[in-house]
Structures are given as structure tokens and as C-alpha cells.
């Protein structure tokens, strides 16, 4: 009797949880820029998110898949904070 050892491929790391919050004017105003462009998704409206660049510019963005590719459309920019 010969024992066979089956070598399974290593597990892939789990993806980080998406950043979903209920977007309100106050929460968007309080968001701070990070080291790179950051997308914060709205928990109540699928596809809606806020993009924050490392320079601090904030824009509302709509994202969805069209023909198996991501389609991202900028809806509008937030006015600069005083």
C-alpha cells in the first residue's frame, strides 16, 4: 500500500472589507485625504461613492460594471473646504 500525499495550493488572502458608510454632507466634509486616491462607498446607494485624492479634492462618483468592465462616471465635485 502506497500513501499518496495531495499538495493543495496555498489559500489566497482574503480581500480587505470595502469601506462602506452612510454618506452624509457632514461625513463627506470630515473625510481626510490619504497617501493615495481613496474611494468611500455609500452603504445605502449601490454604486455611489466619494473619491478623495491625495491632494484633498473630493468628487462624487458612480461605478458599475458594463460588459464585464468597470465603468466609472464622475457626477460632480465638492467645493473646497474653508
Image: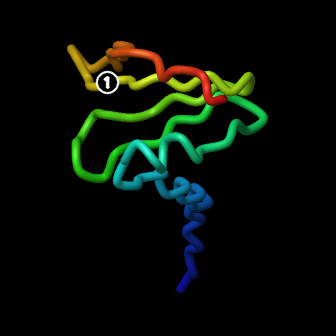
Q: Which one is nearer the viewer's eye here, 45 or 76? A: 76
How would you rate the neighbour count of disc 1 (Cα within 10 Å): few for under 14, some for 14-19, many for 20 or more?
Answer: some
Which quarter of the rendered picture does the C terminus lie within? Answer: top right
Q: Which one is nearer the viewer's eye here, 25 or 38? A: 25
22 relative to 38, above or below: below
Report the side of 69 relative to 44 (left or right): right
Report the side of 69 relative to 16 (left or right): left
Residue 22: x percent and y percent? Answer: 34, 54
Q: Residue at x 37, y 47 (%)?
A: 23
Report the side of 79 relative to 57 (left or right): left
Residue 18: x percent and y percent? Answer: 46, 51
Query: Helix or strand or loop: what does disc 1 sit on?
Result: strand
Residue beneath disc 1: 62
73 relative to 57, above or below: above
Q: Which one is nearer the viewer's eye here, 8 or 62? A: 62
Q: Residue at x 55, y 55 (%)?
A: 16
Amino acid at each position: 500500500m502506497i500513501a499518496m500525499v495531495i499538495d493543495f495550493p496555498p489559500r489566497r488572502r482574503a480581500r480587505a472589507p470595502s469601506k462602506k458608510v452612510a454618506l452624509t454632507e457632514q461625513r463627506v466634509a470630515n473625510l481626510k485625504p490619504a497617501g493615495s486616491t481613496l474611494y468611500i462607498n455609500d452603504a445605502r446607494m449601490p454604486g455611489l461613492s466619494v473619491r478623495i485624492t491625495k491632494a484633498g479634492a473630493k468628487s462624487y462618483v458612480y461605478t458599475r460594471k458594463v460588459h464585464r468592465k468597470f465603468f466609472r462616471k464622475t457626477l460632480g465635485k465638492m467645493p473646497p473646504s474653508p
